[in-house]
Amino acid sequence: MNPITRRDFLQASGSLVVSVAIPGAVATALSQGISSSAVLGGKPPLLPDQLDSWIAVLPDGSVTAFFGKMDMGQGVDVAIAQMVAEEMDVAFDKVSVVMGDTATSCNQGGASGSTGIQLGGVTLRNAAAEARRILVERAAKKLEMPIDRLVVENGVVGVLDYPLMRVSYGELIGGKHFHHRVEWNKRYGNALALKVQAKPKDPSQHKVVGKSFPQKIVAEKVYGRAEYITEVKVEGMLHGRVIRPPNAGCTPVSVDEGSIKGIPGARVVREKDYIAIVANREWDAVRAAENLKVTWTAPTAPFPSMEKLYQHIRETKANGKGMPVNKGDVEAALKGAARVVQAEYEWPLQSHASMGPACAIADVKDGEAQLWTGSQKSHFGRAGCARMAGLPPEKVRATWVMGPGSYGRNDAGDAAHDATLLSKLTGRPVRVQYMRHEGTGWDPKGPAAVFRGRAGLDASGRVVAYDFHGKGFTRQEMATNESDPKDTLAGQLIGYTAKPTIIFQTPAELYEFENKRHGWETIPPMLDRASPLRVSHLRDPLGPETHFASESFIDEVAHAAGADPVAFRLRYLKNERHATVVKVVAESARWQARPNPGRGKGDVMTGRGISYTERNGTVVAVVAEVEVDRRSGRVWAKKFWVAHDCGQIINPGGLRLTIEGNVVQAVSRTLFEEVRFTENTVASIDWASYPILELADAPESIESVLIDRPEMAPQGAGEPSTRTVPGAIANAIFDATGVRVRRVPITPERMKAALARI
């Protein structure tokens, strides 16, 4: 790769910056042929209120959309291209999407909260509609015809009944700028929204939206042509490796630089408690990092033993609490109930376990900086690295290049700050790539929690009280992005103080119980500085944990009431959309009423379970079919049926693939994933000590039923199915065996122990 320097980019002022629609491709400056500086006064500033910040038309009539988010393999860029093509009346293959480059796009929050289409796409849809409106107005003037006589087809504006009277977008503006102001809500990130004069099309007019288009990047990956962050090379760069303490909380006392004297070009870089190695060759940096002798302070025991994690959560004094649902008088209703059902559930710390450890390259010099990052939030990465380098954000360019994975705040943000700090201290470009043990051992973790459910039933089995409470680590000990060094290992080691945000989760469902309460508590971090067990967002933050517990408990209440799990849910769901997904998934799976679980007969027991949840406007219901092998304890999540309602569907094929990815990853987290640790270190450092789902354990089938609601705005799909799967698996295990498993992961050892009790 030959990356563009910031100087090259600035010298290309007045030119469009475009790329092929491949995530991670570094944008290439192309000449417009006509100097817009002379004709229209130059390219407008990259601000949300400029239409040129969102849409460009090239001389050949093709369209480029500038997207301030990125894609994690789900095909969000494909859907964005569809929405833009639809509103501008151009062919899908004439739209390119440039993503995640701070030099070409506004900060739309990166990939976050399943908002790629729900928020980011709607912004691009409005911009495209406004671009079409302006182009049609210009065509009316050029053709000297009223607007109501004009039609647009594939980027060409024509006149009704006069086929020879026509003008293309390329002729109207190709290679030049709109110079048109739009209204925006003055909010950066996910919430950024545009208000324009144009009105987007009615769904009945859609020709591109609603159809399935494949991801071009798949072929690029298969044939080895896709470009990854690990392949970025910058002239004169050094290779960096960070030295982590052998025991959490330890700080360096002394460093023996002579211990790496025999390794060519390797040297120590130190800033306060931060120690790293840089070298001209990567292997030399690796060897030096392994050989460097550091004396550390005496180890302490900042963590409880792993066996006491849930005891620690239960007994630690809360530092935050909330009660977002408090209807009726729960305590009085529980006291008057004929029967009270109660249960507790436990969810572990989990690693992002990205396919590969993080990598980043930074070049800080001459009062400017460039960052190449695999993070899902390059705009926030720019802000954080600007702070780390002591530069204004406008002097830093961050370019997203496809990495090994993200799905939340993984180690990519830390790698970006490490590279920036090392480049600042050495005056050279620095590439930092972690090793496997760092990626799994030191990435921010998904939080652990315990949950308690209590429900009161009257003599007829009707729910008269429902109480659900969660307690655990905040889901934002580390911020959701790397916009501040205080939320990175490097920043904390050089003196930035961590400031966790107190936030938790309660069940997202619409069960209508007369007396209902949802509450939560958080506890402080186990180690408040540079901790390998610091927690942050992992795909659907606290969603799988909370809904594993809440949907398992709903099943327990249904069983206590002697009711079929589907019928029980429908009894208390009055919202049409929410009830519909439950009905649809039951019908799809050919659900048969099962008020009582199986008796656990035979060596291989089969069962089915249901779960339903909502997430930010998307409603999902899942039926899982499992096989439980009594002899080995193995649980095979064999089949899934998913009913999915995310409003208007942009790309059905892409949506199905996204749902399948949700399901597979959720199965892995439910049955396999758990961070192992001692009182002073993380023991999960590779695929043996942190196993994930492998091919032999993948589901045999995943059948998705998509409920399209074109009258609704599109909602998110990147996470809702994730939170719905764990409860369905646990409930299917109960149906198969008659045993409730209330701790994740549901390993063979735990399953055998549970079966031994029947």
Image: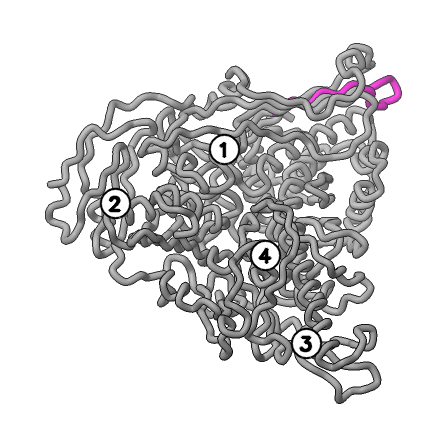
Sequence order check, earlier mark of 1 and 3: 3
User: Of the residues shown, which amino acid type is indicated by label 1?
Assistant: Leu
Front position in the image: 404 or 633: 404
Of circles 1 and 3, which is in front?
3
Sequence order check, earlier mark of 1 and 2: 1
Q: Mark 4 points at which residue?
A: 74
Pointer 3: residues within 10 angstroms few (<14), some, or many (20+)? Answer: many
Quadrant (top left, top right, bottom left, bottom right) of the C terminus: top right
Q: How far apart are the alpha carbons under marks 1 and 3?
A: 52 Å
Q: Give the range drawn in magenta.
A: 451-464
Quadrant (top left, top right, bottom left, bottom right) of the N terminus: bottom left
Q: Name the residue under label 3.
A: 155
Residue reaching furthest right?
460
* Mark drawn on residue 425: 2
Q: Is mark 4 on a helix, strand or loop?
A: loop
Across and down, in percent, residue 399 comes to 44, 57
Sequence order check, earlier mark of 2 and 4: 4
Q: Is mark 1 on a helix, strand or loop?
A: loop
Q: Name the residue under label 1.
A: 349
